[in-house]
Amino acid sequence: MYILFIILSIVISLSIFLFKKKNVTTILSIVFLASLVIISSYAYLNINKTDNIFFKYDSLGVLLSFVLTILSIATFYFSRNYLKKIDYHSRNVPVYYAALIMLITALMTAYFSNNIAVLWVSIEATSLFVTILIFFERSKVAPEASWKYLFVSSIGIALAFIGILLLSIAGSNDGVTDLSFDTLRNVVGNIDTLWLKISVLLIITGFSVKLSVFPLYTVAVDAKTIAPSPINALMSTVLVNAGFVAIFRTFTVIAHTEIIAWTQNVLFVVGLSSIFIVSIQLFRVKRLKRTFAFSTMEHMGIVALGLAVGGIGYYAVILHIVLHSFVKAGLFYQINRIHTTFKSKWIDDFSGYFKINPLGGITMLVGFISVTAIPPSGLFVSEFLIFKALFLGHRYLIAIVAFILLTVIIYILGKIFLGILYGNVPDKIETYKPNYLEHFLQLSFFGLVIYLVINPPAFFVDLINNAISILN
Amino acid sequence: MTYLFIIIYAISLIYFAFEERAKKFVWLLVIQGLILFGMAFFSLKEIEFFDFIFILTETVVVKSIVVPWFLNRVRRHNGLKRVYEPSMPIFYSVIIVMLGLIISFVLSNTILDNKLHTQFFTVAFASIIYGLYFIIIHKNIFSHVVGYLIIENGIFMLSLAVGSTIPLLINLAVLLDVVMGILVLGIFMNRVGDTFQTDEVNQLTELKD
Amino acid sequence: MISLLLILVSALFFVGIITKIKAKIAARKMPSILQPIYDVIRLFKKGAIYSSTTSLIFKIAPIVYFSSVLLAVFFIPFGGEAGLLSFHGDFVFFAYLLAIGKFMMIIAAMDTGSGFEGMGANREALYSMLVEPAFFILTASVALFTNNISFHELFAHFHIGSNLSYAISIASIYVLVYIAMVENSRMPVDDPKTHLELTMVHEVMVLDNSGFDLALIHIATWLKFAIYGSLISDFIIKSTWNLYEQIAVYLGVQIAFACLVGILEAFNARNKMNKNPQWIIVLSALAVVVFLTTLIITQKIILN
């Protein structure tokens, strides 16, 4: 069944690319979005069943695929608005949609893959399609960022591949290598711990370029700085979720072996370094998108800390990435409006947004509250749980350092946001009628985040609990 | 017999350190592709016909014919420089390659795992390390891609080291990697060459704060 | 004894063959093969002129150089028989004999006070230093392979068995040929035909020598070529053959070596000066690879 979905997506993507007509694109996009909804529901209904050896609809995958479906629908809508200004028949726009469809397919495959090699292949494919999309804007810095992103991402993923190969030593009897996660979990006790440590280190390093944490974060941040806003919304959310899935599944493989303590220390280092680097770099950023890219990195650092500490941290981590996806997406969809209003990308040029576009101003304010995890934002709950787990696990020093760094980050973000919202309106700003649907959608994302923590639906909590049941 | 190919591969790494011309890099990649085919051919315990065709395609056709042809085409089409000077003198690079080879051979000696074919692990490790070093000392995009291909060769040998029958999936993955990298390189060389008048990487620093 | 005779005989003709091959490839008129001998005889008849800036060193250096090379000839084995002198570890002594000769030539060149000769001395010293590891590592790997440490026993027990030892001997011969080219100041390190002092290495060191001294230096060059040729032939000749076969193969190898040097000289351009050290260190790197191969063959490194 899943293979059918992949084939359908490839056919749709190729048709859009080859036919290059606007009606065709619109119809096929709607068909694709419908198929996304269908496959997510099908996966939810067949939860924990394997499909075709390589794919398994486990709870983490189902949860993230719901997120992906919702965000894909929103992205398609916002892309339509974003691309309205561009002539359709320049060959870029069909490429944009085709690559977008393939990207979403690859991400779905990554979420559902049961075999570490399939996971690797699908993440590699996402690199390729994201690069095509990053390059869309043809500004002077676009070749730079997309080349660097593709190159470093390929090298990082090659490193992860070495780690996978070393892991597969365990799974091999007489040369037959079965790389599905279940098999790996069973046989991982047989490998020498040194190999296991090296392999886990390589996998974490390799996928850190996708998860946008230390050590290979630079190209991820650069790429998010120049990608078009709707794509940025996808990159900062579902793409880092794919990186998280990779690292999480590796973590479950080694969760019951003796190197768990060492891995947790590695993840502590990764998390703290990421947050530390963000707190330093944020003082120097001058572009708004870059600010948000660093904010993603900070949240992923917190996720790494949560994954490392265990206990209730596991629940909090999955909650955090789901909520963070919606918050970040909402923020990025709003950025496009800010850029077109002020006709610039530099933070220094933005001010007085509240006066120009009150609805947008409110959205930004709510977004600011959400992303800095101030209550009633949902992220507050998940960060609170992570810190609670840190204190319960006697990691006082890490918790205090993280607190201080997060305070610094909130300070800088506050400075930037309030500088944008208040202040004098610069000259030569054209006023326009705000698009109520857009703003309503963004506000609804933030509202969803609040709703999911105040009154979480039962299936949501169940999915998360199932996803982390392996770890306990 | 595979030892012979391993030694010749080690010698090819030394010549990578010694050469400066783009054409020689491409030739060395061709030779490495052929060496990999020899290694794979002689090390498989039993060869099914389909696997054999696949390995033949991957090593000889893709690594030795298609990719170098594509690199040469990109080179000519964009008028790239003939000589790419590294930022560290070649003298020290050769010494570093020597040290790398010695370290990887000694390292494989200390590995007592009998599930790993350490004969391949030696040059695989040396190749990956040297590929990373190559990328660091050269500052232009063409050499970066060459370094990336060296790393991919090392990964191919690592996959030989890990299993005696090569699962199709792993080789498919490596193939995808290589083909993707090269195709996108070609597209990018055209764009980057048009936007900047050079292919030096230190021009690409605008995104820093 | 036989090896001494053979080396002396082949030395007489070596340089002549090189020149002849080069001339033939360049489609020039060939001098006779005995031309170098006639040149040396002519030089013997002349008196030497010594510059007033030089000291005793300059006078004794050619003699020391020549005698060190001649002494080194005594160590070379031939086809399973030892040379005139042989003891454990003699290949180290051999290398440093050659080094003493070179050292005397270098300080003699600096003794003349000429800027060019000092420059040539610098370069000569650098290249010898860089090529020395290659020679030692190569000999060490052969010693490891045969488990003996004198020249005579090294080659007496050098059996070619598996195809890896073929690889060792081919790689060793390749490296030895190039070591010979470097030690004798041939292409692509140094062009013996150039007369631009700025680009010379060895030739410029002997600019001020004349007459008897120059003749000795020339003969020492021939002997060094013949030494390396015998070392190469020692890789090929098996001790189980009978004497006439060995002599025939030996002469064949020497002639082939001379032709090879001639061809390499004719077809190679000389390296840019700053590329020379890199080129020479590649020889050491190849020697290291040969050493690693020997370690694998002799199971000092266990690989499965």
Image (tube, coloured by chain):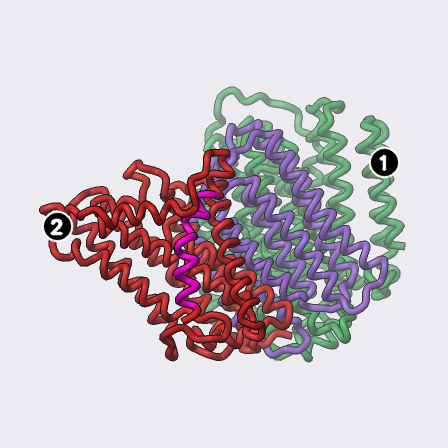
Chain colours: A green, B purple, C red
Any part of residue C31 in sight? yes
Q: Nearer the viewer, mark 2 or mark 1?
A: 2
Q: Are marks 2 and 1 in contact (CB under 8 Å)?
A: no
Q: Which mark is residue C54?
A: 2
User: Which is more toward the observer, C194 or A68?
Assistant: C194
Write down the quadrant of residue A93 in the picture. Answer: top right
Q: Which percent across, then down, holds residue A303?
A: 59, 60
Q: Which percent across, then down, holds residue A62?
A: 79, 58
Q: Main secondary structure of the magenta part?
A: helix
Any part of residue A412 in sight? no
Q: Quadrant of the C terminus of chain C?
A: bottom right
Q: Which residues are magenta?
A: C3-20
Secondary structure under tag 1 reads: helix
Give the residue pinned by disc 1.
A28
Secondary structure under tag 2 reads: loop
Using a 10 Å C-alpha cutoff, classify the residue at mark 2 as few (fewer than 14 neighbours), some (14 to 19) or many (20 or more): some
Tell me what residue is drawn at x 68 percent, y 40 percent.
B183
